Image (cartoon, rainbow, N blue to C red):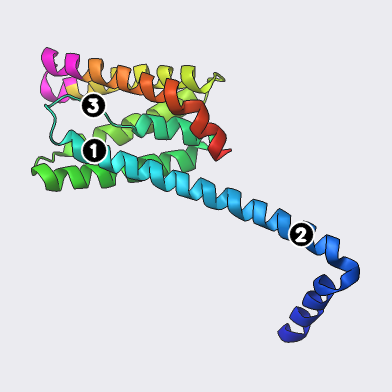
Amino acid sequence: MRKKIFRNVASFFLNKKNFYLTIAVAVVLFAILFSQIRSAILVLLLIGLTVALKFFESYLPRGVNIDPSLFVLIVLMKAYNLPLALAVTIVSFLIGIIVKGFATSRMSGENIIFPPIGYIAVGFFISFFQLGIFMTGMVAVVFYSALMTLLFGLAYGFPIFDIFIFWITIVPFNYWLFASFGQTVLSLLS
């Protein structure tokens, strides 16, 4: 039965009368497939970037934050939806933190739990804003930074130097990411 259906469909598209329809269907299918593959490859590159920078962070002083997770969250949220953006962001962060933990043998529960809480809070908070990619990203960075300062401050007693290092690295780094690549990555994903 399946072979007969396949033969009928194949003969329909291979018929000379339907040549232009066959070409049109092939072009549309190729375009859909290519856009899906391109998006998937770009998402995998964003995950790889997060993991690589988390690993690199393990060799930097405590408090330095060059994590692109907020960039990944906002770009994917704008291109797709909040659940997908949160899933990709949290999974890439956790893979990165595990790699970082193996590199340094420094892993604590707060470092694993607090950032995903922050990503979830940022995702829900930012979903109320209808701003461009750059402004959305910067609002997210400030909100996330304030939340992490509060959470880590309550856990560790507000070490001023670490908080200062955190803020002077996370804000400029994300400013650079959103200003330089935000719109480009968003348009490649859309």
Q: CA distance from mark 1 to mark 3?
A: 9 Å
Direction right: furthest residue: 17
Relative vertical location of residue 153 with respect to residue 46 in this rendering, above or below? above
Can see residue 15? yes
Magenta stretch: give its range.
Answer: 153-165
Q: Secondary structure at mark 2?
A: helix
Q: CA distance from mark 1 to mark 2?
A: 44 Å
* Foreground disc of the pair 2, 3: 2
| Residue shown at the point (15%, 44%) measured from the top left | 101
At label 3, which amino acid type do we have? Asn
Direction left: furthest residue: 105
Relative vertical location of residue 131 with respect to residue 9 in this rendering, above or below? above
Residue 161 falls left or right of residue 6: left
Mark 1, residue position: 54
The N terminus, quarter of image? bottom right
Report the disc number at residue 152.
none
Asked if the stretch drawn in magenta spans residue 159, the answer is yes
Observer-nearest residue: 136 or 152?
A: 136
Quadrant location of residue 108?
top left
Mark 3, residue position: 65
The C terminus, quarter of image? top right
Find residue 8 and report its horizontal and vertical position in percent.
Answer: 81, 79
Mark 2, residue position: 25
Residue 188 falls left or right of residue 151: right
Quadrant location of residue 148?
top left
Residue 119 falls left or right of residue 98: right
User: Badge 2, how many Cα within 10 Å: few under 14, some, many 20+?
Assistant: few
At label 1, which amino acid type do we have? Lys
Find residue 92 and report its horizontal and vertical position in percent.
Answer: 33, 44
| Residue shown at the point (37%, 21%) measured from the top left | 176
Q: Secondary structure at mark 1?
A: helix
